[in-house]
Each structure stands twice: as structure tokens, then as C-alpha cells.
Image (cartoon, rainbow, N blue to C red):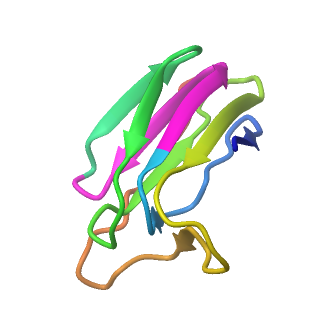
Amino acid sequence: MFQEVDLAPGGFTGSHTHRGPLLVVVKTGTLTHLDARCDVQTYAEGQAFIEPAGKEHVHMGQNLGGWQKTLKTQARGQLGSRPRTCFGHSPNVATPPILKPEG
């Protein structure tokens, strides 16, 4: 089952982790993805990537463009009543910084 997530211009997901791996497909626009090491990846419309599970994989997605972006996500692994996305961060892991849009 896929879930759609919309990011307004300048919006971001907030720092978070996942209890299981998550498949992310960029449905529209471009997503800027920051991980706990502050590595930045850019994913264009139609590209997909996997967000790994675990507290050590804190990350954040941002919309640095001027148009709304839509992501499709699909959780993998155990289903149940526990939340699959955990917001906040571990005190032992750096929180990715918020980037400023260009222009």
C-alpha cells in the first residue's frame, strides 16, 4: 500500500527514522534528502530510493523549489499498530540541518 506525501514549497518532513525500510518514489518535482551525516542527495521526478530502518538512519526531506512536490511511500516489513515513522532524533545522532532555498 502506498501513501502520498505532499511538501509545499520550502517545506520539509522534519527529522525522522523508520522502524522498517521505506520505498520512496518522487511522483512530482524534485526532493532534497539529507541524512545524519549531512550528505545531500537530490531525487528527480520518477526516481526512487530506499530509506533504511533504524534510529541511526535519521534523515529529512526538503522541497527547495517553488512548486509543491508529491512523494509516494511504501513501508516494508512488519505491519501492525506501532507507528512506522518516528519523528525527532536520537541524542547520539546528528540532526540534518535545514537548507535554505536558492534565490
Q: Is residue 19 above or below residue 34?
A: below
Relative to 38, say whether 25 is above or below.
Answer: above
Residue 97, how many percent across, how many down?
A: 40, 56
Q: At 35% from the left edge and 31% from the top edge, which residue is drawn?
A: 41
Q: Quadrant of residue 29?
A: top right
Where's the C terminus, which quadrant? top right
79 sits to left or right of 6? left
Judged left or right of residue 3, residue 25 is left
**Is residue 99 shown in magenta?**
no
Position of residue 59 measured from the top left corner of the image (x, y, whole percent): 41, 56
Q: Nearer the viewer, residue 81 or 42?
A: 81
Question: Which residue corresponds to the image point at 67% horizontal and 40% vertical from the top-left?
Answer: 10
Which image quarter holds the N terminus? top right
Q: Is residue 27 magenta?
A: yes
Task: Work out whether residue 66 or residue 59 is closer to the camera in this orientation and state it.
Answer: 59
Number of numbered discs on residues = 0
For the question of whether residue 98 can be seen, the reply is no
| Residue interval drawn in magenta | 23-37
* Occupied quadrant, residue 37: bottom left
Residue extending farthest to the bottom is: 91
Magenta span main SS: strand
Q: Is residue 39 above or below residue 36?
A: above
Q: Position of residue 94 (x, y in %)?
A: 28, 69
Place of residue 15 in the rendered image (x, y in percent of width and height, measured from the top left): 49, 64
User: In the image, what residue occupies the spot 67% across and 22% down?
Assistant: 27
Residue 81 in view of the camera: yes
User: What residue is shown at x 71% (from left), y 29% (from top)?
Assistant: 69
